[in-house]
Amino acid sequence: MENPEKVIRFSSCRGVTFEINANKTSPFVIQAPQEDEPDGKWVRFPWSSRRSSFRVFPAPDAIQRSVSRPSSHFCDLEDEDKEEEEIVLEEAKDIEKQEEKHQANNKGDFSSVAKPKQQRGSRLSIILLDQGLFTVYKRLFALCLALNVVFLVLATTGHFPYAKKKAALFSMANILALTLCRTESFLRLVFYLAVKALGRTWVPLHLKTATTSFLQSLGGVHSGCGISSVAWLIYALILTLKDRENTSNEIIAVASTILSLLFLSSFAAFPLVRHLHHNVFERTHRFAGWTALALLWVFVILTISYQPASKSYVNLSISTLIKEQEFWFTLAITILIILPWVTVKRVPVTVTAPSTHASLIKFEGGVKSGLLGRISRSPLSEWHAFGIISDGKKEHMMLAGAVGDFTNALVSDPPDHLWVRTVHFAGLPYLVNMYERVVLVATGSGICVFLSFLLQPCAADVCLVWVAKGIEQNFGKEIKDMVSGFPIEKVIIHDTALLGRPNVAEMSVEAAKKWRAEVVIVTSNPEGSRDVVDACKASGIAAFGPIWDS
């Protein structure tokens, strides 16, 4: 028979080794349960920080894995999910074997270990289906498309003669609308006005949340108008071909090429293509759009200068050109497309990598809380958006989780200069300023966009919940110091390297109730964001997270 005093050792899913009946001076000691011991023992996890944001958690008599449903809410560690789940399952089996053996030898009374369930859906299905069939985004898409279809039917049936005569103009109007929905300087103004107008105590909460839903879902207008512009241009081309006697081959050729480019851009933006081949989508959208815009100018000039009677072109004067609506729509589209590129600048940066999981990029100049920025190594190729950390004074920084080619390269090959768009854009986090009490939930590097609300004055009273693996090891001492020193009720940190994966949705609901929050805003991966938002809404708490094409 084995010695009952023999040391039994096992490891947690995060690699922390515990010993039963080991040397009691070890920081990793957990005493084996005794029948005559009272309930309510405590386990102290070793942690070097003395900050108040980190806690000691009570443990029950039996040493067991948490039975709450674990959730994959780690936006910068997604590539490890499958591997880590396999490790958890294997270690659960090992622990069970150790416990059975120990029970046979020492008559111990250990509770059974709850096995984590391996239940993961396709990320694309989460993006497209799990967010619901009647989201605000999809309703805006359907509304824009339905309005255009109604006008198109009225035009084809002869009940809207102006639209039939100006079908190409309606296509341009849709292109102008979709461009506005993606012009960051315009959206920055819209978000600013929304916060100024509605960020008052007397404004009803339902009006604030409705505005937040609308502004977050403007991508639905962009997509709906994109499809509608193609439909109107097809209709205009059909009418032109029917009236071929009064047009030219050049006009038909240019219109057909523009239609092909718009169709190509729309196809590249289709969710399946965009999700699986994002760089292809971005480059196709950009270069096809620019080419279509150049051809649109050719189309406008050709159609205005063509004389059906003589079947020839006449010289255009400025006075003739400015009288045409098509000229002004094309000019407005051109200005909106050029505007973001006027702000592009190559700036010096300092990139440090606290670990292989993330990099910290520092820039000169303070930035207001809630804003995001875009950076690039090659501005004509691809751009990447990140939240901005700043105290609003001398500098700002971005925390980039290493989850793709671009972000991994920031760790392995840090640049000394990057291209930036100097006009930062407003997104969902900026709307925090509209509310009075807000809970901010972040996983992994999603903390980035929320840190500014702790570092500088904020109109809202915020509570931060951050779940991440190895705070200091993966994100560095500088980030850890930013979230330290706050009251426990204001900043709640859950380090999964020490405490395992929690149910972030339950944590968020509990924090929101304790904080008496008007709204919860989360930044996580699609599955994590969905879980938090759904749990909060089920508890009667308004909640928002990143959506597809937000």
Image (cartoon, rainbow, N blue to C red):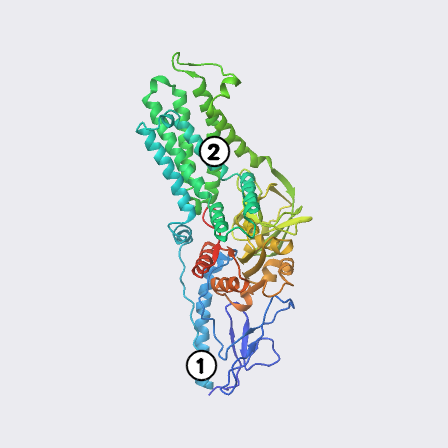
Amino acid type at mark 1 = Lys
Indicate whether 205 appears above or below 328.
below
Dividing the picture into quadrants, the one containing residue 454 is bottom right
Q: Secondary structure at mark 1?
A: helix
Name of the residue lying farthest toward the front: 202
Of residues 106 and 534, the one drawn nearer to the viewer in this rendering = 534
Q: Is residue 281 visible?
A: yes
Q: How many marks?
A: 2
Q: Secondary structure at mark 2?
A: helix
User: Percent position (x, y) of residue 299?
Assistant: 44, 24
Indicate whether 31 appears above or below 457.
below
* Residue under numbered circle 1: 101
Q: Residue at x 50, y 52 (%)?
A: 204
Amino acid type at mark 2 = Leu
User: Could you tell me how far apart the alpha carbons at marks 1 and 2 are, in whole angstroms?
Assistant: 71 Å
In this view, the mark in front (1 or 2): 2
Are there few (<14), some (14-19), or many (20+) residues within 10 Å of tag 1?
Answer: few
User: Can you tell which mark lies on residue 388?
Assistant: none
User: Percent position (x, y) of residue 88?
Assistant: 46, 67
Q: Is residue 272 visible?
A: no
Dividing the picture into quadrants, the one containing residue 245 is top left
Of residues 487 and 350, the one drawn nearer to the viewer in this rendering = 487
User: Can you tell which mark lies on residue 176?
Assistant: 2
Name of the residue lying farthest toward the left: 157
User: Percent position (x, y) of residue 239?
Assistant: 34, 25
- Which is nearer the N-term, disc 1 or disc 2? 1
Name of the residue lying farthest toward the top: 310
Of residues 134 and 100, the one drawn nearer to the viewer in this rendering = 134
